[in-house]
Image: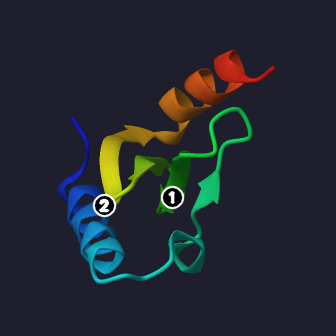
Amino acid sequence: MLPKAMIKKAKSILGKLTQGVHPGALGGKQFQFDRNLMRIPIGYRHRLLCRRKDDGIEPVELMTHEDYNSISHNTRR
């Protein structure tokens, strides 16, 4: 279970993305293996994965940094 503070911060970031704030302004970066998939840091220990769609940005998952590392390291080429 993720801390409530991290969920609240993720919702705040999603609200900013909905308002049109560029993901890069929020610390977001694209993956090299999939340019439509991006990660946005939520504090030091959590990451928000989002997918860029034609009509905006869709959240995929809020996860710990450790879980994020296991995904990002397994998908690198």
Asked if residue 47 lies left or right of residue 71, the reply is: left
Q: Amino acid at mark 1?
A: Ile
Q: In terms of depth relative to the viewer, which is nearer, 35 or 47?
A: 35
For mark 2, does the 10 Å Cα neighbourhood hold few (<14), some (14 to 19), or many (20 or more) residues? few
Count of picture labels: 2
Examine the rendered structure and indicate whether residue 33 appears above or below residue 12. Answer: above
Nearest to the observer: residue 65 or residue 37: 37
Closer to the observer: label 2 or label 1? 2
Quadrant assignment, res 15: bottom left
Q: CA distance from mark 2 to mark 1?
A: 19 Å
Q: Which residue is mark 2?
A: 55
Kindly state the secondary structure of the residue where label 2 is placed.
loop
Secondary structure at badge 1 equals strand
Up the image or down, 41 lies above or below 26; here it is above
Question: Would you say the residues marked 2 and 1 are in contact, meaning their CB atoms lie under 8 Å apart?
Answer: no
Residue drawn 53% across and 51% down? 39
Q: Looking at the rendering, in which quadrant would you find the N terminus?
A: top left
List x then y, in percent, for residue 69.
62, 31
Badge 2 or badge 1: first in the primary sequence: 1
Could you tell me which residue is drawn at 47 percent across and 63 percent down?
43
Where residue 24 sits in the image (x, y, percent)? 60, 72
Nearest the viewer among 16 and 52 is 52
**Which numbered dot is residue 61?**
none
Q: Position of residue 23 (x, y in %)?
A: 51, 70
What sort of colour scheme is used for the picture?
rainbow
The kind of residue tagged 2 is Asp
For the point 20% across and 65% down, the residue is 8
Q: Nearer the viewer, residue 23 or 70?
A: 23
Residue at the spot of label 1: 40
